[in-house]
Structure formats: C-alpha cells, structure tokens
Image (cartoon, helix red, strand yellow):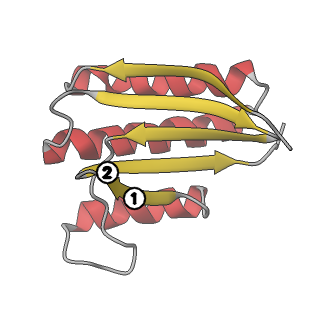
Amino acid sequence: MNAQVELQSIRIPPATVHVASVRAFVGAVARQVGYSEEVIEDLRLVASEAAAQALEEGVADDGIELRAWLAGPRLTVEIEPSGAFASATGGGHPAHTTERRALIEALFPDAEFETRDDRSLLRLSVPDGR
C-alpha cells in the first residue's frame, strides 16, 4: 500500500496579481520531485487557467487553495476553488470556459472536476514521467 504524503499547500488571496503565485507554487513542487520542464509547464498553465477562471467567476472570495502530494509514483495537485468549468462538449457556459476545460482535458485527460459544498475543485494526477 502506497502512503499518501502531502508535499505542500498554499492559499492565495483572491486577486489576479496572485495568479503568478499559483504558477510558481505548482512549478516549484513539480520541480522538487523531478518532473520534466514540459510537464512543469503544462501544470503551470492548467493551474493558472483554473485560478483565473475562479477569479473571473467570483468563486474565490476567500482565496484559492492549492495542495500537492505524492501517492506512489503520481503527483496530485488540487486547486480549490477552481472555476465552474463547462464540459468540453458544451453545457451552457461561456465559450472561454469550455475552451479552458478542453485545454485542461487535452493536457491531463484524467483531470477531475467536482463540486464540494458549492465550491469547485480541480484535481490533476500526473503519472511518474520523470
């Protein structure tokens, strides 16, 4: 049985100026455990898109929390809140929301979008590609 080990977590204030902190956090965590620069850039892009979506929708009133941990050979990153992403096949949300979700799903096909207590959560699980 693989133990889940939390690597780090951070909460940023709800302001667009702090989206850069989201990118820096995700990049630092992935780099710390030895992921390639390509994977790091993909994680940074997706994390900043999720944070931007949350800020645009106003769901991040108390900030955005990011958590990252290793479970076996996989790095998992959670972004809460993330935006309320429409499915890539539609769903009535604005086009840019659907485009963002399509981008996330293209880079991380196993991405999970869920809602907990009226808060959106995006979970990315990255296989050991080091």
Residue 45 percent across, percent down from the top left:
48, 40
Residue appearing at x 76%, y 48% in the figure: 127
| Residue 64 in the figure: left or right of residue 1 | left
Q: Residues within 10 Å of mark 2 (few under 14, many from 20)?
A: many
> What is the secondary structure assignment of the residue under circle 1?
strand
Q: Residues within 10 Å of mark 1 (few under 14, many from 20)?
A: some
Residue matched to label 1: 114
Residue 103 percent across, percent down from the top left:
47, 59
> What is the secondary structure assignment of the residue under circle 2?
strand
Residue 32 bears which disc, if any? none
Residue appearing at x 37%, y 44% in the figure: 49
Residue 78 percent across, percent down from the top left:
49, 40
User: In front: 42, or 122?
Assistant: 122
Residue appearing at x 76%, y 24% in the figure: 33
Report the quarter where the N terminus lies. top right
Q: Quadrant of residue 77?
A: top right
Report the quarter where the C terminus lies. top right
Residue matched to label 2: 120
Look at the picture and state if 60 lies above or below 91: above
Distance (Cα) linking label 2 and label 1: 6 Å
User: In front: 36, or 83?
Assistant: 83
Residue 107 percent across, percent down from the top left:
59, 56
Q: Are marks 2 and 1 in contact (CB under 8 Å)?
A: yes
